[in-house]
Image (cartoon, rainbow, N blue to C red):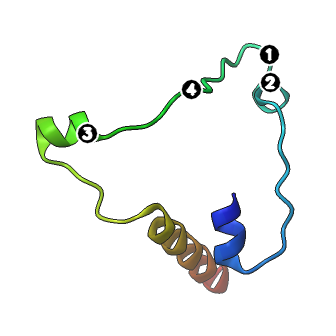
């Protein structure tokens, strides 16, 4: 969320809510998950070509373009 606020150059508030307030009581959050694509890379050779920051910037540009066209 901080990266999006920074990239959009806004002062939008970041609101933290418990998962069950958003998804309902049956949602099970995993707090200790650490994503790792190492096994995927080892088995298939795949690797990310863009950083998280670049992906956010690409999405923002796309949304801005769509808003202009719409």
* Disc 3 residue crowd, few under 14, some 14–19, many 20+, Cα 10 Å: few
| Quarter of the figure with residue 17 | top right
Circles 2 and 1 in contact, beta carbons < 8 Å: yes
Where residue 40 appears, as percent x and y from the top left, is: 22, 37
- Marks 4 & 2, CB-CB < 8 Å contact: no
Seen as rendered, the residue at the extreme bottom is: 68
- Front of the two marks 3 and 2: 3
State how far apart marks 3 and 4 are (Cα): 18 Å
- Residue position for label 2: 20
| Residue depicted at x 66% and y 17% | 28
In whole angstroms, how far apart are the C-alphas of marks 3 and 2? 31 Å
Q: Check disc 4: other Cα within 10 Å, few if <14, some if 14-19, many if 20+.
A: few
The quadrant of the image that shows the N terminus is bottom right
Q: Label 1: which residue?
A: 25
Q: Which of 50 and 27 is in front in this view?
A: 50
Q: What element carries label 3?
A: helix
Q: Mark 4 points at which residue?
A: 32
User: Would residue 34 be found to the left or right of residue 16 on screen?
Assistant: left
2 or 1: tag closer to the N-terminus: 2
**Tag nearer the camera, 4 or 1:** 4
Which residue is label 3 attached to? 38
């Amino acid at each position: 969320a901080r990266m999006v606020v920074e990239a959009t150059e806004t002062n939008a508030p970041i609101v933290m809510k418990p998962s069950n307030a958003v998804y309902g009581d049956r949602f099970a959050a995993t707090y200790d998950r650490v994503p790792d694509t190492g096994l995927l890379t080892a088995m298939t050779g795949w690797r990310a070509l863009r950083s998280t920051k670049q992906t956010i910037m690409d999405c923002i540009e796309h949304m801005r373009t769509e808003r202009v066209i719409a």
